[in-house]
Image (tube, rainbow, N blue to C red):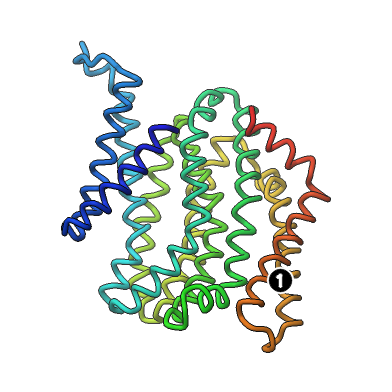
């Protein structure tokens, strides 16, 4: 945790100083490089390892193969995750790219922040119990349930208040970002649990399956993004909303279910607390919108929707699923 904190502080400080000194976009590059260098030095200092050339290359064949699968998977993930931005910039121009970037950045906040936390905390747990199928399945389902309880209301709530949020917080000039934000927020709900399954494959000895799943997305999504630009930003967002879940179900979700002995029924049962509470939240927010009509000022409408939706969600989770919630919190404490 200290290393991550130092990394963030160094990157922020170095980037700002370099920008002030006139390094322009190189400030972003060199700031990140400086942060990673400091983090590497700290890691080597706190957890030193003696380096030695292997007596036989066969002894490192397994780890090298895993590393290859992870690297290829990460490159494929980066390719399909940024292909929409590159294609929109080339085909639709800077203005459209700006609106889409705002939408995708805001929609990704719940997923990216929580996924980063889960990705750093869970691999050791999954790796420890990888040979105990029952324990592995229990941990994967418990983490999935907890992640869904946090990301589902955040993603769906953002989709419900997208118009008011953009107009109040960002301003009228970003109106074009409303629809992409709404659609991509719904995609984020699925991504939050799909990425968890995908990432869980790596520390449990299935890095090759993860690589195949991400390669499938990298091969299929960019051509679809290119074709979808004929329908503007909405077309690209709809590719995320339709093609991404379909490909993930065909590859990463199917692989993970097989690796962790999970059935669709068991998995949906783990998602049910978040799904049921989110549906109640949706009804509460739509009820507020129905009563407000076009009379309430946008800031008042935004605040009322957020408070009403959050209250409805929290009430249902606590009243119907408090036992499941306490079990998840106990697992996190352990």
> Where does residue 267 sit, x and y in percent of width and height?
66, 45
Q: Is residue 154 left or right of residue 279?
A: left
Residue corresponding to mark 1: 285
Q: Nearer the viewer, residue 7 or 56?
A: 7
Residue 185 at what x, y percent from top left? 53, 65
**Direction bottom: furthest residue:** 294
Residue in view at x 30 percent, y 21 percent: 45
Crowd class of label 1 (few under 14; some 14 to 19; many from 20; radius 10 Å) = many
Q: How many discs mark residues in the rendered view?
A: 1
Q: Is residue 292 left or right of residue 186?
A: right
Return the residue found at the far right: 319
90 is higher (above) or lower (below) than 207? below
From the viewer's perspective, is residue 261 above or below residue 311?
above
Quarter of the image where one finds residue 89 = bottom left
Q: Residue at x 51, y 42 (%)?
A: 255
Q: Is residue 313 left or right of residue 181?
A: right
Q: Reply above or below: 301 against 319.
A: below
Q: Position of residue 9 (x, y in %)?
A: 35, 43
SS category of the residue bearing label 1: helix
Task: Point out residue 205 in the picture as x, y percentages from the top left corner.
Answer: 45, 30
Where the N terminus falls, by quadrant? top left
- Compare residues 95 and 135 and report the one nearer the observer: 95
The image quadrant where one finds the C terminus is top right
Determine the residue located farthest toward the top in the rendered image: 55
């Amino acid at each position: 945790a200290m290393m991550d904190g130092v990394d963030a502080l160094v990157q922020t400080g170095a980037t700002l100083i370099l920008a002030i000194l006139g390094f322009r976009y190189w400030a972003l590059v060199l700031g990140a490089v400086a942060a990673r260098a400091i983090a590497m030095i700290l890691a080597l200092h706190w957890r030193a390892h003696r380096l030695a050339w292997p007596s036989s290359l066969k002894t490192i064949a397994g780890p090298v193969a895993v590393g290859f699968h992870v690297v290829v998977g990460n490159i494929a993930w980066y390719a399909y995750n940024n292909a929409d931005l590159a294609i929109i910039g080339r085909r639709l121009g800077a203005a459209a790219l700006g609106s889409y970037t705002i939408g995708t950045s805001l929609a990704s906040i719940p997923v990216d922040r929580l996924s980063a936390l889960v990705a750093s905390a869970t691999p050791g747990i999954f790796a420890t119990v990888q040979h105990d199928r029952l324990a592995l399945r229990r941990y994967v389902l418990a983490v999935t349930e907890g992640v869904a309880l946090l990301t589902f209301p955040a993603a769906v709530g953002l989709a419900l208040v997208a118009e008011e949020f953009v107009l109040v917080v960002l301003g009228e000039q970003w109106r074009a970002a409303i629809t992409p934000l709404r659609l991509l927020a719904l995609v984020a709900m699925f991504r939050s649990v799909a990425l968890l399954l995908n990432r869980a494959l790596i520390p449990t000895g299935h890095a090759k399956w993860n690589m195949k799943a991400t390669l499938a997305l990298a091969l299929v999504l960019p051509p679809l993004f290119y074709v979808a630009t004929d329908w503007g930003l909405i077309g690209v967002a709809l590719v995320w909303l339709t093609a991404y879940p379909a490909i993930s179900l065909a590859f990463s979700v199917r692989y993970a279910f097989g690796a962790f002995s999970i059935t669709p029924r068991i998995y949906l049962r783990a998602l049910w607390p978040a799904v049921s509470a989110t549906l109640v939240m949706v009804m509460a927010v739509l009820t507020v919108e129905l009563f407000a009509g076009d009379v309430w000022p946008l800031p008042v409408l935004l605040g009322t929707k957020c408070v009403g939706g959050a209250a409805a969600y929290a009430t249902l989770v606590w009243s119907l699923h408090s036992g499941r919630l306490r079990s998840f919190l106990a697992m996190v404490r352990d």
